Amino acid sequence: MSARSDNGGFSLIEVLCAILIMGVALVALTHGITTALASTKDSEVQTTVVTLAASQIETLRAGAVLTDETTTGDFGDSFPKYAWEQTVAPAALDGLHQVDVVVKDSKSGASLYKLTTLLFDSDYPGSSASDAKLKQMELDKAKKRNKRGQ
């Protein structure tokens, strides 16, 4: 009788190595998915607060008169997690105001985003007179061009 060697199966060491490699790959895949989901959530929050700050600036721009003060508020039931604080301060030119809008977490009060811009007060006393002067100057120039062309 001769001894027959049958090498048709896997050894225990080979099976354990395959399970170890699959385990490491699964942990790396899970970590990658978790990181991607967290990044997506951060991007969503960032987009939301930027849009809310811009909408607050536009609301202020649509108002009639700018007053130099600091005011606070929230975004109502639509965005209960966020609150705003806006500061309107005079700038270097008369009638020009620096506006800072800070969007905060309503629970912790932590600042999430700050948007700064300059707005011109449309009700500034000199603005209508200077606009009328500019329009008159443009009309005078147009008349001179028309006379030259004839």
Image: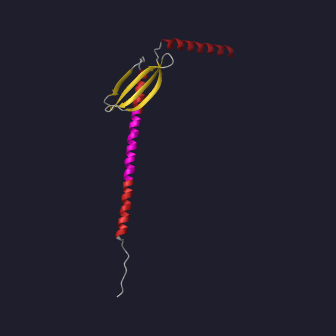
Query: In the depicted view, which residue is nearer to us: 3 or 125?
Result: 3
Residue 141 x %, y %: 63, 15
Query: In the depicted view, which residue is nearer to us: 28 or 76?
Result: 28
Quadrant containing the N terminus in the rendered view: bottom left
Q: How many marks?
A: 0
Query: In the depicted view, which residue is nearer to us: 109 or 25?
Result: 109
Q: Is residue 150 visible?
A: no
In the displayed structure, 11 sits above or below 82; it is below
The quarter of the picture where residue 87 lies is top left
Residue 127 x %, y %: 50, 14
- Horizontal arrangement in the rendering, residue 31 relative to residue 93 (left or right): left
Magenta span = 29-49
The quarter of the picture where residue 49 lies is top left
Instruction: Tell me what residue is drawn at x 36 percent, y 61 percent.
Output: 20
Instruction: Tell me what residue is drawn at x 38 percent, y 49 percent.
Output: 33
Residue found at the very far bottom of the displayed protein: 1
**Colour scheme of the rendered structure:** secondary structure
Query: In the depicted view, which residue is nearer to us: 51 or 145?
Result: 51
- Horizontal arrangement in the rendering, residue 148 relative to residue 38 (left or right): right
In the displayed structure, 96 sits above or below 36; it is above
Residue 73 x %, y %: 34, 25
The quarter of the picture where residue 10 lies is bottom left
